[in-house]
Amino acid sequence: MRAVGIGLLLVMAGSSVFADSLVARFGPAYSTGGIYVDVSAVPLGTSPISVAGAYDVSFSPATPDNSNTRGVVQGPPPNHAIPIPWSGQYFSTGGVSTETITIHFVNPQTSLTFLWGSVDLYNTLTIGNTSWTGADVIPPTGADGNQGPTGSAYVLIATDQPFHDVTFKSDQYAFEFADVRAVPDGGMTLMLLGGALVGFETLRRKFRA
């Protein structure tokens, strides 16, 4: 497995500060379980998606759009690229800063994993009060929208503050992503740190009061 960066581990004792952690690697997937946001059979475009008792997906702007340029899409460019090694339908957003895709999980979650396609600096993922960009996934000199095998990465995020909503946005074309799963923690944070400490993965921890 190719390393994509150097992890920094901070240990704080007797503090009220907590951390959100993100690790990234070129593959394989971190999990094949959990609550899977399945778009394999939904219509292309920006029609709201709802799975009772599990999750809802909303698109902003909410204007119907089935042009295969945003929302649930398929196929290659010009406006998006398939996250490697994914096949089939996936999500894509971008073009203007007000365009977003939000996944709302009915029950609170503490860990999330997904495939981040052709990572760009202007891609932004937000959970609660914490945001990550492409620079947190691949070092800034590499987060250039590479559409090859080393341009997409599986990411895994763990937080000790439960969340319901995950928002994806991109100021330019495009933020492509697939295989979104809310996964039970079950020691997930220890796995995050362990993977980074042996140098296999990028680790990003964001501390907040």
Image (cartoon, rainbow, N blue to C red):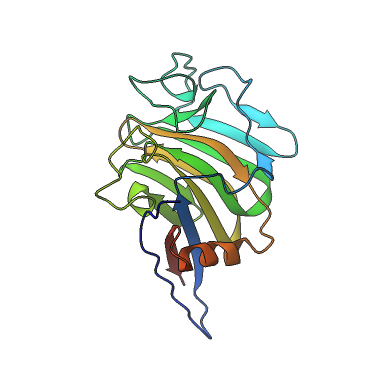
Q: Residue at x 43, y 72 (%)?
A: 9
Specify the quadrant of the image occupied by residue 191: bottom right
Is 18 above or below relative to 95?
A: below
Q: Residue at x 30, y 33 (%)?
A: 172
Outermost residue, bottom direction?
A: 14
Compared across the picture, whether 145 is left or right of 180 comes to left
Count of labels in the image: 0
Is 194 above or below relative to 55?
A: below
Outermost residue, right direction?
A: 53
> At which x and y percent is residue 12?
48, 81
Is 66 above or below relative to 4?
A: above
Relative depth, front residue between 75 and 159: 75
Specify the quadrant of the image occupied by residue 84: top left
> At which x and y percent is residue 202?
41, 58
Relative depth, front residue between 51 and 25: 25
Q: Residue at x 49, y 49 (%)?
A: 155
Is 107 above or below relative to 65?
A: below
Compared across the picture, whether 43 is left or right of 176 comes to right
Outermost residue, left direction?
A: 141
Specify the quadrant of the image occupied by residue 121: top left
> At which x and y percent is residue 33?
69, 44
Relative depth, front residue between 13 and 200: 200
> At which x and y percent is residue 140?
27, 51
Outermost residue, front direction?
A: 1
